[in-house]
Amino acid sequence: MSQNIPEWLAPISLEEALELRARLGDEATVVAGGTFIGILMNQRIIAPRVLLSLRNVSELAFIEPGQDDGRNQGDRKGLPLRIGAMTTHRAVERSPVVRQDWSIIAYTFSLVASPRVRNQATVGGVLADADYASDPPALLQALNATVIARSLKNGEREIPLDELITGYYETSLRVDELLVEVRISGNVEHAVYRKFRSRSSEDRPCVAVAAAKVDGKLRVVVGAVADRPQYFPEICALADGQQVDRELASEVGRRYAESIDPISDSRGSAEYRRRVIAVEVRRALEEMNP
Amino acid sequence: MSNPRVTGAIRYAQDVEFEGMLYASILRSPHPHARILRVDASAVPDSVVVLTPDDIRELGMYGCQIKDQAVLAADRARFAGDPVAAVAAPSRREAEEAIDLIDVEYEELTGVYDAVEAVSQGAPLVHEHHYISDNDAAYFGMRPQEGTNICHRFRIRHGDVDEGFKHADVIIEETFRTAGAQHAPMEPHASVARWEGGRLEIWTGTQTLFNLRMDLAGIFNIPENQIRIIPPPMGGAFGAKTFVRYEAIVACLARKAGRPVKIVLSRYEEWLTLNRHPATLRVKLGARSDGALVSKQVECWVDTGAYADCGPGVAQKMGYAAVGPYRIPHVRVDSHCIYTNLPPNGAFRGFGAMQAVWASERAMDMLAAKLGMDPLELRLKNVLVDGDHFCTGELMHDVHFIECLKAVANKIGWADNRQGKGLCVLMKGMQTPSRASIAVEANEDGTYTVRCATAEMGQGAWRSMRLMAAELLDVEPERVFFPEPDTDIVPYDTRTTSSRSTYMMGRALVEAVRDLKQRGELGYGECVNKGGLDPDTGQGIASTHWHQGTAAAEVRVDEETGRFQVVKLHSAIYAGRVINRSGAELQNEGSMIMGLGTALFEGITFAEGQPTNANLSDYNIPAAGDLPLAFSHDLVEREGAEVHGLGETALPPIPPVIGNALYSLGIHVIDLPMSAEAVLNAIDRRQQRQGMDAGEEVDRNKSREGRLEAERRPYIPEAKGSQG
C-alpha cells in the first residue's frame, strides 16, 4: 500500500477531536465538509499526512437561537443566533429558525455554488479556510459575528470576525484550536448582501458587498476583492446619525473603491473591480434604505 | 424503457476492467517549449512499467491531417503538458507517485503563444518540417508552408474583390477575436489497451474509430486488421474524443508490460489534451447604398496549438463559413492554420463555424448600421435562395434561410422595436467527401441486428438509428438490436462528427434495408457524398448538405457594471424531416446553452504558455441558472423533406445574436467572450464616441478604423507566387 494515502482520523466527540488537534497540531489537516481540501488534494497542491475529520462530531452541527442579552429593545430585531461549525450551508439555508429571523443569512448561504456543494460545505469550514472568494465571511463580518475557538489547553476563546481572517487562507486560529461555533448578536437592523457575479450564476463573487446596521452603526464589508474581507469603520462613520440618501451612498461607495487595493483574477481585473465596488456599495446602501 | 445513462447501467471506457490490468499516468513537460536532454527513470520501482522517449523512437509518427506527433515528445516538448514519459502501475496512485520519480533535464526554448505573432518574422518554429498525413482524415489538398508555422493555408478566389470594393458605396472593416474553449464533457478521456497474440485491442471513448485505427497501424507498422477498436458509449464528447489521444501511449505501455493498461484523465489534463481553436478574423465587407453586397475579404488566423490535429480542416471550414450564406459577387478568403506552443486545438461542436459566424454576422450588423438599414432587411436582401451559387461555385438547393430568419424575427418582436435585440443567420457545412456504410441482419426470431460505426456520445444517435430502422423494417423499435461498434464487426464509416450521422448513415440504412428485402437475410448499404474544395481557389463542393440556422436575442444591460442579462433567446434551425423529436430538441437546446457559455464567459487563459484556469472553478461552463428568462427554439420542418443533421447548428449563432443585441445599444464588442468587463469597456468607448460627436465633426468610423488599423492589424507573410 502506498505511503502517500493520508491517515483518516474521525473522532466522534469534540473532546476527542480537541485532543487529537492538540497532539497533532500542524501534522493533521482539519477537514469539515471537504469541498475545499478535496480540490487542493486532487490538484496535488497539498498532500496531508493525516486528515482530522470533524464529520462525525455531531455536537457541532446545530442551529440555536442564542441567549437574549436584553439589549434587544424597540423595533423587532433579529434574535441572537448560534450556528455550530459543522452545520452545512444547506442546513443554514433551509433552517426555519434562520429563515424566519435571519433571512439575510439564509439568503447568502443559498447563493454559494450549487446544492451539491452546499450539502457538504460547512459554516466552520468556510470561515477557517478563509478563501477570499467565499460569500459567507463578508456577510458574517458585516453582522459583527464572532466565532468560538476551542482548545484543550485554553478552553473557549471568542474571536470577532473582524479579527479572524488575516490574509489569503490565513486566520488567527491557533494550531491547537478548532473553530466550533459562530455567534451573532441580535442587534442588527437592515442587512443586505449583494453578490456580484461577472460570469456564471454558479460562480463565486467578483465583488461581494454586505452591509448592516449593528447597534445603530453602519458596517459595510466588501468581499472577494482582496486577501480578506474589507471593512473601513471610518468610512462607515460618515453615516453616523445620518439618513443614508443616494448622495451619501455614492460617497461611501466612492471611498470604499478608493481605499481598497483590489486583486485581478479570472473574474475581473483590479481596475474593473474598483469600478464595481463603487457601484455595488452604493446599491447595497440604497437597498438598505429604500 | 429505463435509460441506462440514468440508472448507471451504462459501461463507459473507464469502467472496462481486466484481470491484472495496470493504470497509466503521464509525465508532462512543465515548459511550453523545451529541448529534452535526458529522461532518467532509474528511481522508479521495478513493479512499475515505464515508457520513455527511447522506447518510442522506432515507432511511426501520427496526426490525422499533418503527421507531426510522436507517441511521446521525444526530443522536444512543444507545449506545457506535452507527454514526455508514461508509467503503468498496479494502482492509479502508485502510477501518479512513480511519475514524480522520473527526472527530466530540459533546455528551455523561446515559445510563441499567439497565432498572429507565430506568423511574424523571426517567430520560433514549432515544427521544422510539415509532413502530410496518409490518414483518410487528410481528405483535401494540404498546403503547409515550409519554414513557417503555417501547417495549412486555404484560399477562396471568387471574382475580383479589389474591383468589387471600388463599386461599393459603403465599406466596413473590423478584426474579431474568439477565445479557446474546453469541451468539458462529463466523462474525461479514458482508454484501455491490451495485446492478444500480436493483435492490439483498445476500448476507448472515440468518435473516430476508423481514423484512430489507421493512425495506430502507422505507429506500430502493423496492418489495420491487426487492430481492433471498441468505442463504448461516451459521456459527452463534443469533438474532444477524435483521432489519436492517449491510445498510442497505453498501447505502448500494454505491450511493454504484457498486461492490459488503462488511462483515465484528470479534469486538469483535459485542458492539456484538446481545446477549441482561438481565432483572429479580419473582415472587410462592402455594399452598394441599396444594401446589395458587392465584395468581401476575410483573413483567418487559426491557432491550432502545438500539433495540427484536424486544425487544417477547421481552418478550411472557418474560411468558407466566414463568407456567410450570401450572394456576393467578389470574395477573397485567406485562412491559415498556425502552430503555437499551446495545447493542441481540434474539433469542437461547430468546427470553425462559431468563430467564422461571430466575425461575419457581427460585420453584417456593422454594415447595416453604416447603411442606415434594418439588419434583417439587409440579410433578407442578400441571403442565398434555391438556385443561387455559393462563392465556391456550388449550386444551392433545399435552402431555407429566409423562412428561418422570419421565424426568429417574429419570435423576438423585431418589427415592434429593435433596441437591445440582435439576430443572425448561418450555414454550416457537413463533412464532404465522406462515406457511411451499414449492415442489417434479419434474425430467425423476427428481430434485426444493425451494425454500424456511429458512436453514441449522449447525442442519441443510436436511438435515432433504431427509430429509422424500425420504420423502414416496419417493426417495433424494441425488435431492432444495435451492438456497440467494434471495428471487427461494423463496416467502414468516416466518423461520428459534423452532424452527419443521422443524414449519412440514415441514407445508408435505407439502402441496406432495400438490399435486405431483396436478399432476405443480410443487407448492406452505403452512402457516399463526393466533393471537396480546391485549397488554392476554394472552388468545388464545400458541402453536399448544409446545416442552416438562425437565432435572435434580446438583452438588458446594467450600464454601470457591464453585466447583462439575456432576456430572450430563440433559434430556428432547419430540420427537414424530424426522426427523433426529443433528441432533436435536446440537440438544439444543448447547442444553444453551449453557445451561451462561449458568448458570455468561456475562454481558456494562459500566462507565457501555462494554462491559468484549467479547472471548473476558474473556468465556468453554463449552469441552469444562466439560461435566459425566455429560452426557446423552432425545428423548421417540411413534410417529405430529407433528414437534416442538427447536432451543432444552434451553437454558432448564439454569440453573434448577443453581440448584435449589444451593438443595437451602441455597445460594440469584437472579442469573445463578452465578459461584463469587456462590455463595460465597450460602453466607455461609446461614451467617448458620443462625446466626440457632440464636440466636433469627425468621421468616427474613419478615425476608429484608422486606430484599429494601426493597433490591431496583424502581419502575415505572403508566400509570393506559391501554390503550395
Image (tube, coloured by chain):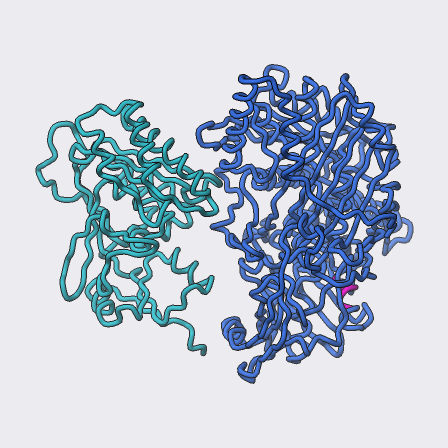
Chain colours: A cyan, B blue
Q: Position of residue B473 (x, y in %)?
A: 80, 45
Q: Which residues are magenta?
A: B212-217
- Camera-side residue of B89 and B469: B89
Q: Is residue B520 above or below residue A111?
A: below
Q: Is residue B108 above or below residue A113?
A: below
Q: Is residue B470 visible?
A: no
Q: Is residue B122 above or below residue B61?
A: above
**Which quarter of the rendering shows the C terminus of chain A?**
top left
The answer to whether B146 appears left or right of B124 in the picture is right
The answer to whether A4 appears left or right of B209 in the picture is left
The answer to whether B345 appears left or right of A90 in the picture is right
Q: Give the residue displayed 75% in from the left and 65% down from the top.
A: B62
Q: Give the residue displayed 67% in from the left and 62% down from the top.
A: B245
Q: Position of residue A279 (x, y in %)?
A: 38, 31
**Which quarter of the rendering shows the N terminus of chain A?**
bottom left
Quadrant housing residue A2 = bottom left
